[in-house]
Image (cartoon, rainbow, N blue to C red):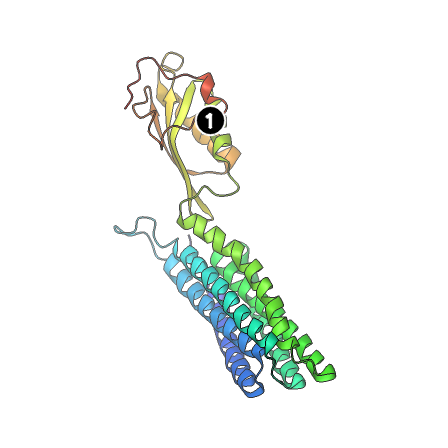
């Protein structure tokens, strides 16, 4: 992964500054007006500040080269940051929901117009930070996390504005915790996919756009390939997908098993977009029944090619 562009680093720095001002203004305003909506938004913005700091730090780490100790470099730094962000967002949403539920039964008076004004400033600032991060959000899961934080905060601020309007015009204090509960759903809905995607990467799961059984079937359809086993597909980070596998070769049909290396590599690259791979070609499978090797339960073609009679098993 190349070093983060200086323009992105500059945008992250500016985002940190703007978000810090939002946090201070909303917390003071929420404390002064006794508004749960404003204080919840301030708390959520504080989480966003953490996400922006993590995004900034992760980009600095990801630009470092691989070392003897960390042979993949720091590519996973952004994914770890995204996982932490998603988990904190989920916990924050649950916390806001509990407090808002209590406030529904025990509402307090809050000044609606002041809430509208403070939340309006926050919404504009959140939109500004989101625009700063939008360009980097498409390709980077970590920047996408920070971007989602800011977009959700902007929506939260709009909700608080509407609640403030209802309180000011119709004296409905329950709107303050009610809008908080509604926005909790928005928080949870937006943060769950981010949390799930980053967790899957950390668990070395197969990327969701790839189907293991289809990859096995495609490789086993190559003339001379008897079966594929010990297959592992994972992402170091969303843009770096790795594959390792053993390929059992029909030595009668393909006397020189190395001739199959190029067709296998070309198929994986052109059909599935996998360019980082380690392929071990073999003429007998010594670990056919090992749990991590046997892929018969995944494929339809594996039954067509029985193991070689001379293969060793354990």
In this picture, residue 87 sits left or right of residue 68: right
SS at badge 1: helix
* Residue carrying label 1: 219
Q: Is residue 1 above or below residue 128?
A: above
Q: Position of residue 194 (x, y in %)?
A: 51, 56
Q: Residue at x 64, y 78 (%)?
A: 120
Q: Residue at x 45, y 58 (%)?
A: 82
Closest to the observer: 199 or 3?
199
Q: Position of residue 136 (x, y in %)?
A: 52, 59
In this picture, residue 89 sits left or right of residue 258: right
Q: Position of residue 164 (x, y in %)?
A: 67, 80
Q: Residue at x 40, y 57 (%)?
A: 80
Q: Position of residue 244 (x, y in %)?
A: 38, 35
Q: Seen from this angle, which residue lies furthest front?
A: 105
**Looking at the rendering, which quadrant does residue 206 occupy?**
top left
In this picture, residue 29 sits left or right of residue 68: right
Q: Is residue 201 above or below residue 136?
A: above
Q: Residues within 10 Å of mark 1 (few under 14, many from 20)?
A: many
**Looking at the rendering, which quadrant does residue 159 occupy?**
bottom right
Closest to the observer: 198 or 275?
198
Closest to the observer: 129 or 66?
129
Q: Is residue 214 visible?
A: yes
In this picture, residue 261 sits left or right of residue 46: left
Q: Is residue 277 above or below residue 201?
A: above
Q: Seen from this angle, which residue lies furthest bottom?
A: 32
Closest to the observer: 163 or 285?
163
Q: Quadrant of the C terminus?
A: top left
Q: Seen from this angle, which residue lies furthest right?
A: 169
């Amino acid at each position: 992964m190349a070093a983060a562009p200086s323009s992105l680093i500059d945008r992250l720095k500016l985002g940190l500054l703007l978000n810090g001002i939002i946090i201070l203004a909303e917390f003071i305003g929420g404390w002064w007006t006794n508004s749960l909506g404003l204080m919840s938004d301030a708390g959520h913005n504080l989480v966003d500040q953490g996400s922006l700091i993590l995004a900034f730090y992760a980009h600095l780490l990801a630009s470092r080269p691989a070392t003897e100790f960390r042979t993949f470099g720091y590519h996973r730094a952004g994914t770890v940051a995204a996982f932490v962000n998603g988990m904190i967002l989920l916990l924050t949403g649950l916390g806001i929901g509990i407090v808002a539920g209590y406030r529904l039964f025990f509402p307090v008076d809050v000044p609606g117009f002041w809430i509208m004004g403070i939340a309006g400033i926050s919404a504009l600032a959140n939109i500004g930070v989101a625009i700063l991060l939008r360009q980097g959000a498409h390709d980077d899961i970590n920047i996408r996390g920070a971007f989602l934080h800011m977009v959700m905060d902007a929506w939260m601020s709009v909700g608080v504005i509407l609640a403030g309007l209802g309180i000011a015009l119709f004296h409905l204090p329950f709107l303050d915790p009610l809008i908080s509960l509604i926005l909790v759903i928005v928080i949870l809905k937006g943060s769950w996919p981010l949390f799930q995607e980053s967790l899957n990467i950390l668990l070395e799961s197969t990327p969701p756009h790839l189907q293991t059984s289809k990859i096995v079937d495609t490789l086993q359809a190559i003339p001379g390939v008897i079966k594929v086993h010990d297959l592992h597909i994972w992402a170091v980070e969303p843009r770096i997908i790795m594959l390792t596998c053993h390929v059992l070769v029909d030595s009668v049909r393909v006397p020189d098993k190395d001739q199959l290396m190029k067709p296998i590599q070309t198929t994986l690259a052109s059909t599935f977009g996998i360019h980082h791979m380690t392929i071990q070609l073999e003429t007998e499978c010594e670990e056919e029944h090992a749990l991590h090797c046997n892929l018969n339960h995944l494929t339809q073609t594996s039954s067509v090619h029985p193991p070689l009679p001379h293969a060793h098993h354990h």
